Amino acid sequence: MSRHRDIRNMDYSDEYDGYDDVYGHSVEDDYYISPSNRQFLYNRENSTRSSEGDIKEEDEVEAQLTDNEKEKLEECIVQINAILESKIIPRNDLVNIIISRNFDVQRVLDVVLDDPKYKQTAGDRRDKVFMQPTTIQSSDLEPSNVKVVASTPKTATNVTKGFELPSKLSTSPRSQSPASGRETPITASTAEGSEDVKGRARDSRIDPHQLYKKERGEGKEHLYMVVIGHVDAGKSTLMGHLLYDIGQVSQRIMHKYEQESRKLGKQSFIYAWVLDETGEERNRGITMDVGRFQFDTKTKSVTLLDAPGHKDFIPNMISGTGQADVALLVVDATRGEFETGFDYGGQTREHALLARSLGVTQLAVAINKLDTVNWSKERFDEIVKKLKAFLKQAGFKESDVTFVPCSGLTGQNLTSKPTENSLAAWYTGPCLLDVIDNFRSPERPISKPFRLSINDIFKGTGAAFCVSGRIETGTLSIGDKVLVCPNRESAVVKSLAIEEVPKTIVFAGDQATVTLSGIEMQNVSVGNILCDPQNPVPVAMRFQARIVVFNVTVPITKGFSVVLHHQSLGEPVIVSKLISQLNKSTGEVLKKHPRFLGNNTSAIVEIQASRPLALELYSECKELGRVMLRVGGVTIAAGLITKIIL
Amino acid sequence: MILLHPMGAYHTLDLELNRKFSLRKAEWDSVSLERIDLACDPTKSADVAAVIMQEGLAHICLITSSMTLVRAKIDVSIPRKRKGFVQQYEKGLAKFFDNVMQAILRHVNFDIVKCVLIASPGFVRDQFYEYMFQTAVKTDNKLLLDNKSKFMLVHASSGFKHSLKEVLQDPAVLNKISDTKASAEVKLLENFYTMLQCEPAKAFYGKKHIEKANEAQAIETLLISDNLFRCQDVNLRKEYVKMVDSVKEYGGDVKIFSSLHISGEQLEQLTGIAAILRFPMPELEDDESGDEED
Ligand SMILES: Nc1nc2c(ncn2[C@@H]2O[C@H](COP(=O)(O)OP(=O)(O)OP(=O)(O)O)[C@@H](O)[C@H]2O)c(=O)[nH]1
Ligand SMILES: [Mg+2]
C-alpha cells in the first residue's frame, strides 16, 4: 500500500516552485520529514523542577513578586485547588508553573493535568517514564530502558514511546492476570522496557455497559447542547449571562470584560465576551467559531456549544451541531428582526433544518429580547405559532419542543422566575435553566465499534499532539490502538481527557481530547475518523445517498458541484448521478433517472468525491451516515448514506 | 509570452511575443477557426489573479480568457479556538496568512496582472488583507505597497475552487476586469439552471435530448464544452461540429465553454452539452433516455 503523504502543514515557501499545474500534480513522496524527529525533542518544562535547589529558587522567585502579583498568585492557587480538589501538587511547583505561565489559570491547569507527575493514582511510575525520559529517578528502571530509539519512518507510524498503559479498572479481567500491567508488546524488540510498544488491541470480553456504569454511575448525566439561531439573535449574550448568573464567570472577569468592551464601544456585548474569545470576534461583535463552556444544572452536567449565527460560518455550526445531543434555538422577538431571521434566507430556518437533519430531536426555543417588545404576550404567541408550524414540518415532534420567553441582556427568566411584572403576569412556566435541565439525555451507543470524528487538532504540551472530537460510538481507553481514516494510519492513545479532566476511558457521546502517538500531526486532518483497527470505518470515493432537497434557487442536476459536510469535514464533491426520484413520505420510486431535482423533492443520488472519504451506512451508524450538501453558502439538501461504492 | 492552447489539445507551445509563426492543420473546421481568432486577440491576456480562501485553505488562480490556472493550493490545519487557548488559533492563522502571502508574491506577476481578487467567506479576506499590508509595511515590501490599489476584496462562500464562479459574478468584479469571458460563461450556465427551475421544458442537457431539440429547430442557445471537440473519436467530433453549425444556421446562439474554466468544468460534468430552447418541448421530458448515456 502506498502511503499518501499529505502536504498539510508543510512550510510552503520553499516547496512549491513546480506547482504550476495543480490539476494533476501528485505530491506523493515529494516531501520527507522524518517522523521520528519528535523523539529527540526534550521536554524542558517538565524537567526543571526535580531538585531541591530548584525549589529554593522558586521560593526566592515568589519573594520577588510585587504585591499585585502575589495577589494574582494566590487567586490562581485558589482557583486551581478548587478545580483539582486536592493538594497533589507541591506549592513550590505550582508557584513556579503559575509564574512561568503568566498567571494564566487555564495554561497552568493544562501543564499540571498533562503532567503525569501529578496524577493522584499510585503506581503511575510508568507514566513518568512515558512523559519524562530524562528525569526518572526510580531505581528499578535502568536508564537504558528509556533510551530514545530512533526508528525508521516505516515503523514509526505504529510506534508509541514509553510504555503501554493498562486500563486501571479492576473489573477488567486482564488486570487480575499475572501479566497485569502490560499487554503483550508485539514489537521486534520485546525486552522489558523497550521503547517500541504497540498499542493494545481491544478486549471483547469487557462489557462496555458495565464499564460505563462503573465509571459514570454516580455522576450527573452529561448533556451536549448547541445554541443555534440567526445572527445577532442574542445567543452568546443569553448564554454568557446565564453562566454569569450561575456563578461560572467571576465578577472580576465580568468587570474586566465591561471595561474592555466599553473601550471598544461594544458594551452591549459584555456577556457575549464570555463565549466570544478571539480578538476578531470581540472587535466585530460576531461569533465566528463555536464557543464552549461547561456548567451544571440540577441533574445534568452540560457542555454548551455556542454556534455562530452568521451565514458564512455555517460550516462551523454544522461541526458544532454534529457534537450535540440537543439544541437551543434562539430567536429575536424584536419586531422585524424575527421576521428577518425566519423569512426565506434567514438562518432561523436553516439552522433548525440542519439541526434536525444532523440528528437533533429535542429542541428548546428561547424567544429572546422580549424586553424590546415590552414583554408582550401577543408577540410571544405570534412567534410560537409560526415556529410551531415550521418545526413540525421540519420533523420535530411537538412534545419535544419547548418554548421559553426571556431576555439575555436584562437576564429575565434565565435562572429564576421572572421579576419583571409584565412578564411574570402571564408566564408561569419554567425558566431557561430548568428547561435545559429537563432535556432527556440521549442513548449512548457504547457497545458499537469505536468511532470518533475529529473536529480539532492542536499541539499539547511538549511534543505530543491532540485531537478532539465526539466519540460517536463505542469506547476508547488509554493505550488503545486506533486507525485514522481515510488515510488508514495507525496511532496509539497516549492520554484522554474530557473538558481538561484526565480520563482512562471515554464513551460514546463524550467530547474527548485524545493525545495520539505514533503518527505525524500533518497526517491527521479535521474531518478524519478515528476508529477501531479491527473494525474500521469504510473508506470510499463514491457513495449513494437518499437526499431531501430543501428550498433551492436552481435545481440539482447531474454533475452538480456541491460542498459535502460530513461531521467536521467540508469537501467539494460532485452529484454524479440522479438515480431516482422518490415520494417524500412513502419512499416509493416516482421516476428513474430524473433530469433534475427541484424544491422539496426526495431522491437517491450518487456522489463522487475526488479523494477517499471515511463514511458509514446510515443503517450501520447513524452518526456517520448523515451528510449535508451546500452550494454557494446555502444548504440545498440533507442526506443519509444508503450505499457505499468501494 | 503568449500561452496558446490550440484545439487539438495536448500540445502546448510557448511562443515568443512578436515573432511570427504558422500553424498548419489538415482541416480547419468552424470551431477551430473561431478559437484561433479568440486566442489572437491581444486584449485577452492574463491580467486577473484570484485568491479564493477560507481559514486554512487557499487557492491562488490566474484567469485568462481561455483558462483558469490554479497556481498554488495552500491547505493547513489551524487549531480551533478553545476555552482559554485562543493563542494557538491566532498563531495558526497568522502562519496560514503568511503562506498565502508568500504564494501571492511568488505567483502573481504584477507587471501583467491588473487586478488581484481576494475572496472568502466571513472576514478572512479582510483579516488577510490587513495582515498582508501590515507585513508589507514592516518589511518594506515595495512590490506589494506599490500595487495595493490592484487588490479587491470580494465575498465567496468557501475556499474551494468552484467558489470562483461566485466571485466572477460579483458586479463589482465585472466592472473591474476587462476580460469577461470567464464571467460570461458563468452567467450563461446560471441562465440555463434558472430556466430549468422555472420552465424545465425549455432547458435540456445530454446529447440525445439536444439532438432532438435541434431537429425541431428549437435551440436558442447551445452551451457546449470545447472538450467535446477534442474527443478521440473523429466521427463524434464531426457530429458535434455539425451540430454547432446547424444550430447557428437555424439562428441559434452557440457558446463554447473552455473546459479549463470553472463553469466549463461544470458543463463537462453535465454531459458537456446543454441548451436553452425557444419553445417548450415537454415531449422530451418524458423521454427518460436523456440521462442514461454515461
Ligand atoms: N435588547 C436586547 N438586546 C439583546 C438581548 N440579547 C442580546 N442583545 C443584543 O444583541 C446583540 C447581539 O448579541 P449576541 O449575543 O452577540 O448575538 P449572537 O446571536 O450570539 O450573534 P452571533 O453569534 O454573531 O450569531 C448584542 O448587541 C446584544 O447586546 C436582549 O435580550 N435584549
Ligand atoms: Mg454569538
Image (cartoon, coloured by chain):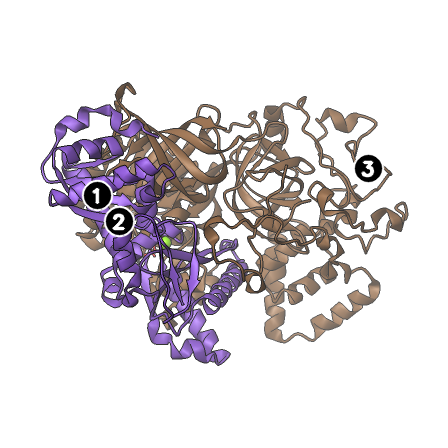
Gap in angstroms between the C-alphas marked 1 and 3: 68 Å
Callouts 2 and 1 close, C-beta under 8 Å:
yes
Residue extending farthest left: B279
Type of residue at label 2?
A: Val
Badge 2, how many Cα within 10 Å: few under 14, some, many 20+?
some
**Residue sitting nearer the eye, A274 or A508:** A508
Report the side of A435 relative to A483 (left or right).
Answer: left
Provide residue B161's location: percent of width, then percent of height: 39, 52
Whether residue A85 can be seen here: yes
Report the side of A397 relative to B246 (left or right).
Answer: right
Whether residue A363 can be seen here: no
Say which of marks 1 and 3 sits in front.
1
Quadrant of ligand 2: it is bottom left
Asked if both marks, 1 and 3, belong to the same chain, the answer given is no
Which chain is drawn using purple?
Answer: B
Whether the residue under disc 3 has CB within 8 Å of ligand 2 = no
The local secondary structure at tag 1 comes to helix
Residue A207 is drawn in which quadrant?
A: top right
Provide residue A371's location: percent of width, then percent of height: 24, 53
* Chain letter of disc 2 in the image: B
Residue A125 is drawn in which quadrant?
A: top right
Say which of marks 2 and 3 sits in front.
2
Residue found at x 24% / y 32%: A600
Residue matched to label 1: B244
Residue found at x 41% / y 63%: A280
Instruction: Name the colour assigned to chain A in the rendering.
Output: brown
Whether the residue under disc 1 has CB within 8 Å of ligand 1 = no
* Chain letter of disc 3 in the image: A
Residue matched to label 3: A188
Badge 1, how many Cα within 10 Å: few under 14, some, many 20+?
many
